[in-house]
Image (spheres, grey):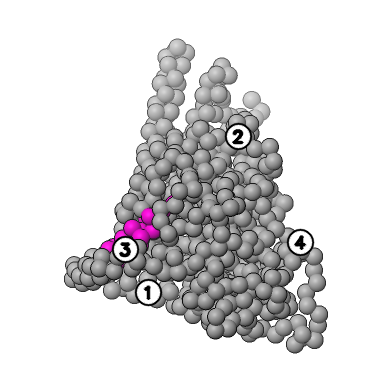
Amino acid sequence: MVYKGKYTVFKIRSSPWSIWLLRVSWFLWLLFWAEFTIGSWKELEQRAFIISLIIFLVSLFLGLLLWLWGYLKFKKVKS
Amino acid sequence: MNRRDFFKFGLGGGGLAVGGGLTSGSDKRPSSSSQNIHGHPWWVKKIRIPKLAVDENVYSRFNARKNVFGSFSEYYKMENRRELMRKSREKRIKYYMENRAGYRLEDRALADAAWVISRLGGLNRGTRSWTSKSVPTPEERGVERYKGSPEEATRLIKSAARYFGAATVGIAILDRRHIHSQERGKEIVFELAAEPYEDEEKLVIPYKCEYAIALSVQMSLENLQRSPTAISSAGSSMGYSRCEFLVAGLAEFIRGLGYVAIPSVNDLGSSVAIAVDAGLGELGRTNRLITPELGPCVRLCKVITDLPLATDNPIDFGLLEFCKVCKRCARACPSNALSFDDEPSFQVRGEWNNPGHQAWFEDAPKCLAYWQESTSGCSTCIPVCPWSKKDKTMIHEIVKASSAKIPALDTFFTTMDEAFGYGRQKSAKKWWYLNLPEYGIDTTQGKG
């Protein structure tokens, strides 16, 4: 292959549009809570900061867990 | 594109536009911050007359002696007041001995020191003189007085006011009923005169002074969140001192343009009524002004002038509906002085209230008695208000805009506000370790 070693190739697994919608929603949800967390920290609002940080981290963790579960399922089917 | 524009035209605006149809008011038109740098956020509507009604047959000029500061001994009874003072003194000493945070020597010294500029003025006294001319008049400069259009003059006044420390500025035609009938033992009268003046019996405002410039000064929310301590008290006193500087500076500026200017803080007349007319905010459950940008976290002052100006409209940002369901200030009030009524009414609570207008009237002597009891005043109703927010996160703008457009969400917002811990008292001790900006305020707040 001519291009071998010249490019890094990212492969994006094709998924139904509903999955993409879910991913985008999750990303926006995370963005919202991240902004809220940083803002609350700047506002010196301790309780709002802690609650928003927890929601952000839980959302991030659950999302990643779901993503990992889907990825492992895909790998299993492929193999 | 700033954050407001983002909400207006972007994500937030799309969602809220749907809710916009749920509100009523055919004579209302939206204000735009992009058209006017001194305008309100896009979700604030201009209206023709303030939402709370005035009984034209009853509402009249108020004798300042009847306000709670003027007649506290009468309202609270002298013997009760003496007892209150005695308890307050004992408590002060007890707190000193305990080295209680917020009531220590340094806290009280800060609160008292922050009054320093405010003490320089009073009704037609010192920095609030009605005739002082510390700047050269146009005559002295050998030129004609300022001849710009009312719109141009308004732009100058608003820019100068902002420069002297105003958070928001509004202009109204002066409703003379907002001016006290008597103060400091003298009558306040309107006369055909070239200049305002004072003699042995009266203070005279010239008829030609038809315009009222309503001004708000931001207070430090970080201080007020320490209420009721001397740290919180310092937030209020700093607000008053900054008002003093603002009205003195603005009045001299107007005199420098060749016109009459009468500066005033809490004296002379109701700053709240003038501010409502001038569209700075709405009257809230505390019977005080609540602004869309800073909530109730403001001190008010005003300048009366004969300089022709373009006036602003009263505003509606859904506060009346919000206050009906929220009631957080009433629940948080340690003296139980605020009304829990669902609807505002014409029914006053005592002689300290000026009758003839709709409001949630407060039991002012109870409030003032608690100021003594706490030994350092109280402003608890201000930081607990969900409209008192710093604007470091988008959520506050989203909530405010949604509340203005969809009143059905108000109960949910109030519950969430409490759940997220807003309005909770903060540590007075920690205040001394904060890295706060000048005056403890963010002067860019509410400016888009």
Q: Which chain is home to disc 4?
A: B
Residue A76 location, quadrant: top left
Among the two numbered marks 2 and 3 on one chain, the one whose residue lies closer to the N terminus:
2
Among the two numbered marks 3 and 4 on one chain, the one whose residue lies closer to the N terminus:
3
Q: Which chain is home to disc 3?
A: B
Q: Mark 4: few, some, or many residues within 10 Å (few <14, many ≥20)?
A: few
Q: Mark 4 points at which residue?
A: B151
Q: Mark 3: few, some, or many residues within 10 Å (few <14, many ≥20)?
A: some
Q: Tell us which disc is closer to us: 2 or 3.
A: 3
Q: Mark 3 points at which residue?
A: B76
Residue drawn at point x = 55 percent, y = 80 percent: B201
**Magenta residues, as a range?**
B360-380
Residue drawn at point x = 64 percent, y = 71 percent: B190
Residue drawn at point x = 44 percent, y = 52 percent: B348
SS for dot 4:
helix
Q: Name the residue under label 1.
A: B112
Give the Cα distance between marks 3 and 4: 48 Å
Give the Cα distance between marks 2 and 3: 43 Å
Q: Residue B130: percent from the left, percent from the top?
A: 61, 78
| Relative to B248, residue B441 above or below | above
Marker disc for residue B23: 2
Give the Cα distance between marks 1 and 2: 46 Å
Q: What residue type is labelled 2?
A: Thr
Q: Residue B64: percent from the left, percent from the top?
A: 48, 68
